[in-house]
Image (cartoon, rainbow, N blue to C red):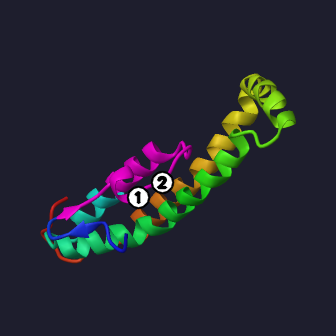
Amino acid sequence: MDTWSRGRVTLVGDAGYSPGPAVGGGTALAVLGGYVLANELALAGGDHHAAFRGYEQVMREPVERGRRVGPSTLRQLVPGTRFAARTTPQLMRLFTRLPRRAARTLSALQGADRRTLDDHSSTRQPTRSGGPA
């Protein structure tokens, strides 16, 4: 899809981003998209076309990153050999016993979206005064 917007309507979350199967970050992308869209609408001072352009510009890179995660996740989760079919359940059980490592990995993955939020909120300024807050 070239754009997530038409007229006064824009898509957020899976409806627009199509993250694919097994991404696991669809909810995070949707929440990030809602935050960015709300911020862009406030900054645009009533110009929804400008807000939608800004929203799509900010979200394009996190969405592309999220789309790349799906295929690699499927390759890791769907066993391709008999050996993998036997060892995958054992590795899954082992993974659940490593909460610190899992938390660090999740935190590192979420850090990219946090940078998007930080970068977005610190560099953007309202386009007109008197717009919605």
Q: Residue at x 43, y 56 (%)?
A: 18
Secondary structure state at the residue bearing disc 2: loop
Task: Answer whether residue 100 is visible to the viewer in this image.
Answer: yes
Residue that carries the numbered disc 1 in the rendered image: 17
Residue situated in front as seen by the camera: 125 or 101: 101
Percent position (x, y) of residue 33? 37, 55
User: Is 59 situated left or right of 11 in this image?
Assistant: right
Percent position (x, y) of residue 55? 33, 67
Percent position (x, y) of residue 114? 52, 54
Q: Residue at x 75, y 35 (%)?
A: 101
Q: Are marks 1 and 2 in contact (CB under 8 Å)?
A: yes
- 7 w.r.t. 19: above or below: below
Residue that carries the numbered disc 2 in the rendered image: 19
Amino acid type for the residue under numbered disc 2: Pro
Amino acid type for the residue under numbered disc 1: Tyr
Percent position (x, y) of residue 76? 72, 44
Q: Residue at x 69, y 39 (%)?
A: 77
User: Is 35 situated left or right of 97 in this image?
Assistant: left
Task: Answer whether residue 13 is visible to the viewer in this image.
Answer: no
**Rounded to the nearest whole Å, what is the CA distance between mark 1 and mark 2?**
6 Å
Q: Farthest residue in the front direction?
A: 82
Question: Residue 99 is drawn in which quadrant?
Answer: top right
